[in-house]
Amino acid sequence: MLLACVPLSLRTYRNSPMNIELLERSFEQIRPQAIAFSNHFYETLFRHNPGIKPLFANISQQAQGKKLIFSLAAIIENLRSPEVLEPALKSLGARHFEVGTLEEHYPLVGQALFETFAAYLGSDWTPATMDAWQEAYEAIATIMLEGAQNPQAHLEPELTFYDWVDLYGEGSPKVKDAIFSLTNFQYGKTS
Ligand code: HEM
């Protein structure tokens, strides 16, 4: 599975020729169907892995779906700014560790995400697009897991992932507006 490969270090991630254009373009394609996309993702994730559903017991599916799209948008928006993404993802990984997410869960989420992209992009889910997303997901998961290894160093209880991006990311007001218009996500509210 994904994380069984040689783990990417942040340096490798920074230097890797990630196909950012392809990632941005494919994300733009799913943006107009953001809510349906995230519903499909969770349906796929839970159908293949019913055992992980209890992890999500404390959060409504609606809130969780918005968070998925919000976080993907924030990540895509900041791919060109790894110095922004790194602390945000480490803190996100630390938070995931605190709610019981294990390393072995990451490939399951990745698989459901790729299946959902395949369903929504159809013939545009080309081998190159798939490679770009697999590489990006592996880099994201690896950085999150670095945060999970030492959660106290990265956990900022007052700061959510979105706050991190907001504090450090030049593009985040744009992200915030775009996502709000798509999802009516109430910034700072999770349910
Ligand atoms: C690239 C991988 C992932 C991304 C980008 C991501 C993104 C997010 C974001 C942005 C949140 C909201 C955090 C907050 O409110 O502060 C969240 C929450 C959550 N994620 Fe993930 N996630 C990822 C992987 C996973 C995996 C592998 C699992 C485990 C199956 C998981 C389970 C959860 C759960 C259970 C919550 C709710 C936490 C709570 O109760 O507040 N996530 N995720």
Image (cartoon, helix red, strand yellow):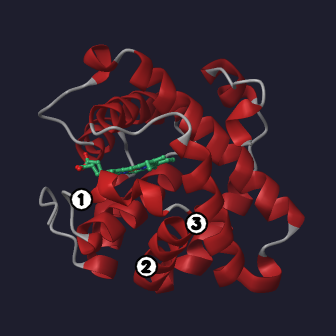
In this rendering, the answer to whether 122 lies above or below 6 is below
Q: Which residue is mark 2?
A: 39
Q: What amino acid is labelled 1 in the image?
A: Ala
Residue 187: assigned label: none
> Would you say residue 173 is visible in this rendering?
no
Label 1, label 3: how far apart the Cα atoms are: 17 Å
Q: Quadrant of the C terminus?
A: bottom left
Q: What amino acid is labelled 3 in the image?
A: His
Disc on the earlier residue, 2 or 1: 2
Q: Residues within 10 Å of mark 1 (few under 14, many from 20)?
A: few
Q: Which residue is mark 1?
A: 57
Q: What amino acid is labelled 2 in the image?
A: Asn
Q: Residues within 10 Å of mark 2 (few under 14, many from 20)?
A: some
Q: Which residue is mark 3?
A: 48
Q: Quadrant of residue 160?
A: top left
Q: Nearer the viewer, mark 2 or mark 1?
A: 1
Secondary structure type for disc 3: helix
Q: Residue at x 65, y 40 (%)?
A: 138
